[in-house]
């Protein structure tokens, strides 16, 4: 496992190179073994059962090699103090996954030492949140599928996450690990409170870049969003989608939204057409993006906005429907609000 710090970003990479080499060695041996049953100089003299035995041995070696490669993915973790975000990437034959989370949500980062069957030291990094849900930076023996939103299972979507950060500010625990190894992690995670404080201190004024009129035009119709400037602790938004129905422009969807602060977090309250009022609580916040979450909602569970330059905004809703991931993205371009007041 390699741990290195580049600027404000801590990189933790665990690539099981020796195991990959072992798996490839088994597969190469299996290939030669099976090939010898047909291509060896004395292959024609082999009895059927001898040929079958050689093929069986080769198949077994190949299966062992595939198993080794299948169960030993590489994992990469990045902790970025500049953006206040972290990510865990798992790459292997079994799956490819990417887990994103806010450093403000990380209560503990543990470096745990254990021993393998030969008595050699093994280290594993664990990231846990306020509800004690745990994400492993390295892939453990039992496959895991961890999503940061699991912290909402306790039924407290914002209270837990807000309370511990005020008391703890992020904590580094090194469990039986060398002091030199843990130093880099302490440097990175020790500043979680600073990153978290910057995020929590941001009110609706942090989203001033969303002010104005935005439009996406496509073959299926036009979507628009209009946001007022931050004032009085709120931002108000309205959106609609207009499509051609029977050769006439028809409003097929519309929403009324309000962004406000509650308990140190921004809240996105929205009333969509034909649905009940729903609130989404801030999960991530920076000077150019914001994410709101409500895992108890049917769909979406997350609402996200990200600025792309001065004249473009990406709006995204995502979540799961019947266990399947789904996302809808709107690529908005800034439009003149004055044009909306013109009589056509």
Image (tube, grey):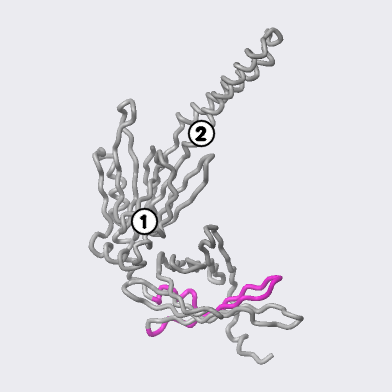
Q: Position of residue 341 (x, y in %)?
A: 61, 89
Q: In the rendering, which numbered label is found on residue 143?
A: none
Please, is residue 189 above or below residue 234 in the view?
above
Q: Image check: 48 left or right of 311?
A: right
Q: How many marks?
A: 2
The quadrant in which the C terminus is found is bottom right
Q: Image check: 104 left or right of 210?
A: left
Q: Position of residue 159 (x, y in %)?
A: 31, 68
The quadrant in which the N terminus is found is top left
Which region is colored magenta? 204-232
Residue, disc 1: 81
Q: Residue at x 41, y 41 (%)?
A: 142
Q: Earlier in the sequence, mark 2 or mark 1?
A: 2
Q: In the rendering, which numbered label is found on residue 69?
A: 2
Q: Nearer the viewer, residue 127 or 196?
A: 127
Q: Position of residue 31 (x, y in %)?
A: 61, 22
Q: Image check: 282 left or right of 44?
A: left
Q: Residue at x 30, y 35 (%)?
A: 114
Please, is residue 117 above or below residue 340 in the view?
above
Q: Residue at x 26, y 54 (%)?
A: 171
Residue 334 seen in the figure:
yes
Could you say whether the residue bearing mark 2 is in a helix, strand or loop? Answer: helix
Q: Position of residue 337 (x, y in %)?
A: 58, 83
- Spatial CA span between label 2 and label 1: 33 Å
Q: Residue at x 41, y 73 (%)?
A: 206
Could you say whether the residue bearing mark 1 is in a helix, strand or loop? Answer: loop
């Amino acid at each position: 496992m390699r741990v290195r710090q580049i600027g404000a970003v801590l990189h933790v990479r665990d690539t099981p190179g020796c195991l990959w080499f072992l798996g490839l060695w088994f597969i190469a041996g299996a290939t030669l073994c099976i090939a010898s049953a047909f291509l060896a100089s004395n292959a024609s003299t082999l009895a059927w059962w001898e040929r079958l035995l050689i093929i069986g041995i080769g198949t077994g070696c190949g299966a062992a090699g595939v198993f080794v490669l299948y169960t030993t993915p590489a994992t990469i973790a990045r902790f970025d103090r500049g953006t206040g975000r972290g990510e865990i990437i798992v790459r292997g034959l079994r799956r490819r996954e990417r887990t994103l989370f806010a450093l403000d949500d990380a209560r503990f980062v543990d470096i745990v030492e254990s021993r393998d069957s030969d008595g050699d030291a093994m280290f594993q990094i664990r990231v846990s949140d306020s509800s004690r849900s745990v994400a492993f930076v390295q892939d453990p023996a039992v496959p895991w599928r961890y999503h940061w939103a699991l912290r909402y299972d306790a039924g407290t979507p914002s209270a837990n996450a807000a309370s511990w950060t005020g008391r703890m500010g992020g904590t580094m625990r090194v469990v039986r690990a060398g002091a030199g190894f843990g130093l880099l992690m302490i440097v990175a995670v020790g500043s979680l409170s600073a990153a978290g404080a910057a995020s929590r201190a941001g009110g609706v004024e942090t989203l001033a870049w969303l002010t104005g009129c935005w439009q996406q035009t496509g073959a299926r119709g036009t979507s628009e969003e209009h946001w007022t400037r931050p004032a009085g602790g709120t931002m108000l938004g309205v959106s609609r989608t207009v499509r051609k129905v029977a050769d006439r422009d028809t409003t097929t969807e519309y929403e009324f939204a309000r962004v406000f602060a509650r308990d140190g977090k921004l809240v996105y309250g929205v009333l969509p057409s034909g649905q009940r009022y729903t609130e989404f609580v801030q999960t991530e916040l920076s000077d150019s993006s914001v994410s709101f979450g409500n895992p108890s909602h049917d769909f979406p569970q997350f609402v996200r906005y990200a600025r792309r330059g001065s004249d473009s905004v990406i709006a995204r809703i995502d979540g799961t429907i019947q266990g399947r991931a789904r996302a809808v993205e709107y690529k908005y371009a800034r439009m003149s609000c004055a044009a909306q007041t013109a009589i056509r």
